[in-house]
Image (tube, grey):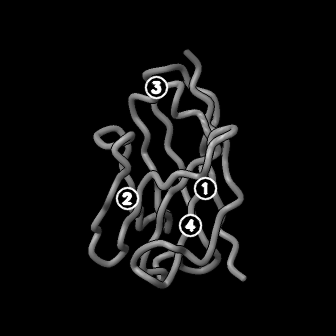
Amino acid sequence: QVQLVQSGGGLVPAGGSLRLSCAAPGNIFRFNGMGWYRQSLGKERELVATTIISSGFTNYADSVKGRFTISRDNAKNTVDLQMNSLQPEDTAVYYCAAGYGLRPPYDYWGRGTQVIVSS
């Protein structure tokens, strides 16, 4: 079983930025598809962004479009989520996920990282 390793997150004021990273033992780029999800208190898990590793194709939830960017970092061997113009409603636990399929559902998950945006 592969456990994805997440880093980043924390507390940021509204309007600020954070970057989350997702790595895997070995080479994360052996997966074909990856995504970032988030779950706020009392809400269902929401798919935030997805990418197809080989092509760089990306897709975003309407709520984050234009503010968040999912990308691969070849030097760090990670897939990152750059989050700009953060708002209090972005407060959630963020999870990365990966799979051998191009699109969700994914097979492997990170443990989650907390993002808190203060107003």
Q: Is residue 40 left or right of residue 20?
A: right
Measured along the vertical axis of the image, is residue 93 above or below residue 23? above
Q: Nearer the viewer, mark 3 or mark 1?
A: 1
Structural distance between the alpha carbons of marks 3 and 2? 19 Å
| Quadrant placement of the N terminus | bottom right
Structural distance between the alpha carbons of marks 3 and 1? 20 Å
Q: Residue at x 34, y 38 (%)?
A: 67
Q: Which residue is mark 4?
A: 97
Structural distance between the alpha carbons of marks 4 and 3? 24 Å
Residue type, mark 4 in image: Ala
Q: Which residue is mark 1?
A: 95
Structural distance between the alpha carbons of marks 1 and 4? 7 Å
Residue type, mark 2 in image: Ser
Q: Is residue 99 left or right of residue 42?
A: left
Secondary structure of the residue carrying tag 3 is loop
**Labels 2 and 4: the sequence-earlier one:** 2
Measured along the vertical axis of the image, is residue 106 above or below residue 17? below
Q: Which residue is mark 3?
A: 16
Q: Is residue 111 left or right of residue 66?
A: right
Q: Which residue is mark 2?
A: 71
Circles 1 and 2: CB atoms closer than 8 Å: no
